[in-house]
Image (cartoon, rainbow, N blue to C red):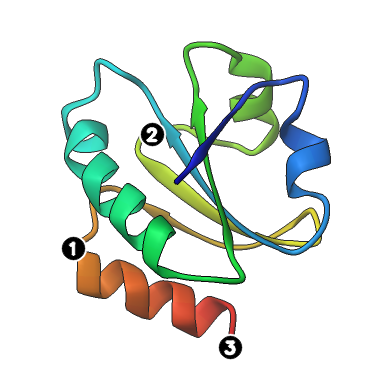
């Protein structure tokens, strides 16, 4: 299950280990389509933390990570961005991307 982050816990939550962060908004159609895929893959994969971040709740964090369109999914390792994807992804493509990023 993906944990909802905010500007107070973002850095602490992503500073160690592997993290996948979904930057989204409730009003965004593609974000809502990505939500069940993100949740399902997050439950299936072990050893990777899945987080969600609502850009409407903190423009500062979204700006710091140069999130200009949503959904944006950022892959992080030990607090540093290692890759990102923009837009909706199919489940198999999403799993393949995670596997390739965190080999």
Residue drawn at 16 percent across, 28 percent down: 29
Q: Say few, some or many: other residues with alpha carbon within 10 Å of mark 1 (under 14 / 14 to 19 / 20 or more).
A: few
**What SS does tag 1 mark?**
loop
In the displayed structure, 10 sits above or below 91; it is above
Residue hosting label 1: 90
Residue 17 percent location from the top left of the image: 75, 64
Q: Earlier in the sequence, mark 1 or mark 3?
A: 1
Q: Residue furthest top?
A: 57
Which of the two residues, 29 or 91, is positioned nearer the viewer here?
A: 91
Residue 69: mark: 2
- Disc 1 to disc 2, how far (Cα)? 18 Å
Q: Position of residue 97 (x, y in %)?
A: 40, 74
Asked which secondary structure carries label 3, the reply is loop
What residue is at 45 percent from the left and 46 percent from the top?
1
Going from N to C along the chain, the mark reached first, 1 or 2, is 2
Q: Is residue 82 left or right of residue 24?
A: right
Depth-wise, is mark 3 or mark 2 nearer the camera? 3
Tag 1 near tag 3, CB within 8 Å: no
Mark 1 and mark 3: Cα distance apart in space: 20 Å
Residue holding disc 3: 103
Q: Which mark is residue 102?
A: none
The numbered mark, 3 or 2, whose residue comes first in the sequence reads: 2
Q: Name the image quarter holding the C terminus.
A: bottom right
Relative to 31, say whether 85 is above or below.
below
> Residue at coordinates 34% horizontally, 73% vertically from top-left?
95
Q: Residue at x 54, y 11 (%)?
A: 57
- Measured in 3D between alpha carbons, the distance from the residue under mark 3 to the one under mark 2, in whole angstroms, is 27 Å
């Amino acid at each position: 299950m993906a944990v909802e982050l905010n500007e107070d816990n973002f850095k602490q939550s992503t500073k160690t280990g592997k993290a996948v962060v979904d930057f989204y908004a409730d009003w965004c159609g593609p974000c809502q389509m990505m939500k069940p895929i993100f949740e399902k893959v997050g439950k299936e994969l072990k050893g990777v933390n899945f987080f969600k971040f609502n850009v409407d709740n903190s423009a500062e964090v979204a700006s710091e990570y140069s999130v200009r369109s949503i959904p944006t999914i950022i892959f992080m390792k030990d607090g540093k961005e290692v890759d990102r994807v923009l837009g909706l992804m199919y489940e198999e493509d999403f799993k393949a991307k995670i596997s390739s990023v965190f080999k």
